[in-house]
Amino acid sequence: MKVYLRKAISMLLTLLAVSFIVFAAFEIIPGDAASSRLGSNATQASVEALRHEMGLDRPFLLRYFSWLGGCFRGNLGTSYSYHMPVAGMILEKIPITVTLTILSMLLTMAVSVPLALLSAKYANSRLDRAVYAGNQFLMAVPSFFLGILMTWVFGMVLRWFKPGGYVSYKKDFGAFLGYLILPSVAIAIPKCAMSVKLLRSAILSEANRDYVRTAYSRGLSTMEVLYRHVLKNALMPLITFWGMAVADMIAGSIVVEQVFNIPGLGRILLTSIANRDYPVVEAVILLIAAVVLLMNLLVDLLYRRIDPRLRAE
Amino acid sequence: MKKYRNFNFICGAVLTGFCLLIVLTGLIRTPYDTTAMSVADRLSAPSFAHWMGCDNYGRDILSRVMEGMRNTVWIALLTVAIGTLSGVVIGAVCGYFGGLLDDILMRVNDVLFSFPSILLALVIISLLGTGSLNVTLALGIAFIPSFARIVRSEVKKQSALEYVESARLMGAGHLRVIFVHILPNILPVLLSSVMIGFNNAVLAEAGLSYLGVGVQPPQASLGRMLSEAQSYLFTAPWYAIFPGLMIVLMVLGFALLAEGMTEA
């Protein structure tokens, strides 16, 4: 229990450090938000007035702490370009990106484990080689190109779905999920290929261990040995990979959201970068950092659950 | 050098050679001027005159693909150079000396490392502004953590070995030990991560250009071509397929080459 507490505290401290770095980073760039909002032909006085109104004339540390305090109360500041609370703007987009990420993750898990088992069971067979070749190829295809190809094939040639026909989750959740399937496939495929490759080699390297021979000598069948003994151990490196893949999938969804015209977190991040709408950019980055750190913590805890050796420390 | 006689290596070498040939040819000349527009050829299909067809301004896609590949390779090389050089210095110093500096730097490094590089690059671009120079810088910075991490753990492993101690006893300074004695021993590991890094850089650059923050027009870039092609996907699918295919071939070739080298 003590270990968990220490890990959680260290995660919070790291998040705090990230928040400071992010806030400071947007501080050192030349030209503040007030002057960029008013344009180049604004008078000195009006810029000063706006700076005062936005609170930009206060000392840096004071602003940081008031921003941080706001974050804890759920107030992430006001968007420069939309004049709306940032928290509300982002909160609306979170379900979209989260659904996309969860769908991609589920797809990756559901497809990669059976495929890796199959390919390890029949190692060096024709099937194994075909899977290997497919993996190598698919790892090289960027997910946004996959998305474009899918839009062309399924949306335009076969007409299975309407490109750009995104439906809000508030309006019709079923249609929303339906529209997200292809994007999540596009995000999942490269990760899936990587998972299959990792798991296959992990299974094969486990298969020569003593405990496997013992299990066979106890009269277990190949399937039983694979599922009850080998898979458990072989999944360990994959869990680390999946933990990191979540962050990659969020990043991937930023690009793929553009391909399929989905108004998620990626869209809001890109438009606010273009508009120099720093409160929004800061909030989105902080949110993603929190998710990344949380995933690291989860993987760590999961490791301890699965592997008793780690708990002994 | 050992001879790499396996299938992966041969396929990788052929694909990489093919891509290199296109890039090098593009350096000397392209079939058409990359910015020459011709209304009559707007969105025309692949033909003998235009092997990959023409885009929405009637520009020859093959010529633009050649220029785009050159830009991509250039940016990826610079990115990897920035990442490797800084990563080697940071990683070597941290791994060799250890201590408080190592603790602090690696703590920061771990957080940055778990951030996807394309996201990190986007953050840096939002600070620096768009354009190919800034993208190179942003990606380079975003790649430092992964190299620093690898170099650090390798240097740490090596510095516990006896040859390091004996070099120290012979009076070699710390810097000499790090760069003359230790570094050559970690080169094989570094080389394979440089190759993987190059591929990641190509993919990240393509992604950023697709998002419109990379190479700016009228300069051609594969990612931006893909995003422009999306509006004409129905009438001119080849506009999207060829640039995308070239990204795939480039990455695939290099990945197979790296794989073949580690196998041998």
Image (cartoon, coloured by chain):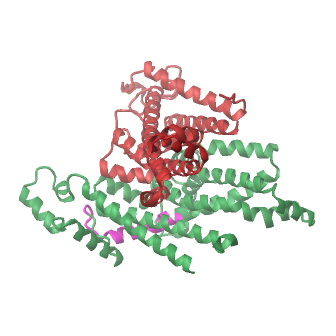
Q: Quadrant of the C terminus of chain A?
A: bottom right
Image quadrant in which you'd find residue B11: top right
Q: Position of residue A43 (x, y in %)?
A: 7, 55
Q: Is residue A216 left or right of residue B44?
A: right
Q: Is residue A276 left or right of residue A90?
A: left
Q: Is residue B203 above or below residue A85?
A: above
So how many labels did they put on this image?
A: 0
Q: Is residue B161 left or right of residue B173?
A: right
Residue at point 41% right, 70% down? A13
Q: Position of residue A134 (x, y in %)?
A: 68, 44
Q: Position of residue B145 (x, y in %)?
A: 46, 51
Image quadrant in which you'd find residue B60: top left
Q: Is residue A273 visible?
A: yes
Magenta part of the protein: which range?
A: A80-99
Q: Is residue A53 left or right of residue A262?
A: left
- Colour assigned to chain B in the rendering is red
**Residue A91 is covered by the magenta coloring:** yes
Image quadrant in which you'd find residue A130: top right
Q: Position of residue B151 (x, y in %)?
A: 52, 47
Q: Is residue B11 above or below residue A240?
A: above
| In the foreground, A228 or A37 | A228
Residue sticking out furthest to the bottom: A1
Q: Is residue B231 visible?
A: no
**Residue A172 is covered by the magenta coloring:** no
Chief secondary structure of the magenta portion = helix
Residue at point 25% right, 66% down? A83
> Quick one: which chain is green?
A
